[in-house]
């Protein structure tokens, strides 16, 4: 039985991926900050819930030790934990900025570093990180999110070369529009947007992002299937897009100046 470790497994893509891999007969180690609150995944066969807060080095160490003692090796590590800090950089507090990078980039990096030995022990494996279309192109009012996702893309590409001698593949998943409550659950707001010079644009943007999801968007289950493909296809291909191909092609069809003008017109009127 193959084994996958998933961070941020309590909801959204992480929960859907846990269910999907378990249904395929994998041993799933589903990690999250508050295991005691999970009332669904704990009922599934082949699912082991373990506490792991990616922003806490001690928590990472304890989770790793528990997994090493019980399983000795793993086949796949899925970095999925994350959220978005919404708002202009000017109004984002130092703590908000640092917390964002600690979750999306620093924590992901530390978890990856910690679990590499378990993949090497297996003499093969795959590290998959959930990035975003926001790691390929940018929009206003989420600058720290984009910065972190761009950095994750660079990290994973560099690791794909670095770990190739050990037969460890490193892959990126780039979801676009997803039917999930991400914008209602997994975002924080910069401080003082109301009554600021950014209020009008910020409210319009947030309204667009939190409106009822379009039936044309992919579901978390669709992303889970792509993650499974990345984990099992045996290819060295390292970028997998979900529901964002047309958006990326649209960006690539435009010059930087054209994209700037279009983005400002659509989002910062």
Image (cartoon, rainbow, N blue to C red):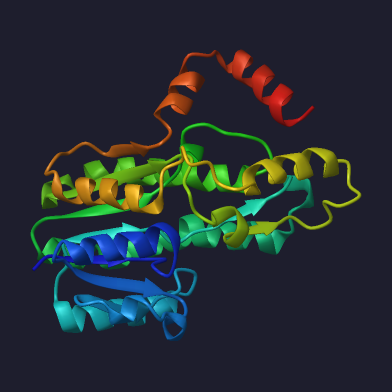
Q: Looking at the picture, how far across and down is residue 41, in whole percent?
A: 33, 75
Q: Looking at the picture, how far across and down is residue 101, in whole percent?
A: 55, 56
The residue lying at 74 percent from left, 54 percent from top is 92
The answer to whether residue 109 of the structure is visible from this angle is: no
To which quarter of the image does residue 122 belong?
Answer: bottom left
Q: Looking at the picture, how far across and down is residue 163, in whole percent?
A: 20, 49
Q: Is residue 167 left or right of residue 253?
A: left
Q: Is residue 124 left or right of residue 183?
A: left
- 214 over 71 or under it: above or below: above
Q: Residue furthest front?
A: 215
Q: Is residue 127 left or right of residue 197?
A: left
The residue lying at 38 percent from left, 67 percent from top is 9
- In terms of depth relative to the viewer, which is nearer, 211 or 53? 211
Q: Is residue 24 left or right of residue 193?
A: left
Quadrant showing the N terminus: bottom left
- In terms of depth relative to the viewer, which is nearer, 109 or 196? 196
To which quarter of the image does residue 13 belong?
Answer: bottom left
- 27 over 154 or under it: above or below: below
Q: Residue furthest right?
A: 195
To which quarter of the image does residue 203 belong?
Answer: top right
- In terms of depth relative to the viewer, which is nearer, 158 or 235? 235
The residue lying at 18 percent from left, 68 percent from top is 118
């Amino acid at each position: 039985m193959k084994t996958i470790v998933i961070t941020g497994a309590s909801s959204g893509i992480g929960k859907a991926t846990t269910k999907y891999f378990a249904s395929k007969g994998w041993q799933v180690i589903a990690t999250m900050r508050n295991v005691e609150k999970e009332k669904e995944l704990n009922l599934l066969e082949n699912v082991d819930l373990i506490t792991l807060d990616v922003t806490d080095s001690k928590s990472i160490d304890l989770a790793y030790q528990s997994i090493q003692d019980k399983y000795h090796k793993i086949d796949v590590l899925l970095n999925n934990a994350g959220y978005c800090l919404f708002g202009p950089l000017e109004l984002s507090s130092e703590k908000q900025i640092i917390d964002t990078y600690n979750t999306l980039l620093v924590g992901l990096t530390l978890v990856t570093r910690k679990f590499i030995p378990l993949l090497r022990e297996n003499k093969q494996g795959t590290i998959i990180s959930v990035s975003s279309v926001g790691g390929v192109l940018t929009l206003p009012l989420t600058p720290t999110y984009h910065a972190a996702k761009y950095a994750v893309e660079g990290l994973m590409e560099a690791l794909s070369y670095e770990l190739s001698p050990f037969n460890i593949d490193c892959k990126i998943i780039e979801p676009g529009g997803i039917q999930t409550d991400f914008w209602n659950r997994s975002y924080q707001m910069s401080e003082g947007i109301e009554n600021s010079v950014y209020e009008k644009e910020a409210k319009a943007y947030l309204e667009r992002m939190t409106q009822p999801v379009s039936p044309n968007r992919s579901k978390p289950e669709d992303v889970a299937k792509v993650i499974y493909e990345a984990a099992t296809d045996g290819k060295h291909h390292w970028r997998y897009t979900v529901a964002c191909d047309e958006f990326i092609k649209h960006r690539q069809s435009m010059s930087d100046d054209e994209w700037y003008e279009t983005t400002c017109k659509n989002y910062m009127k």
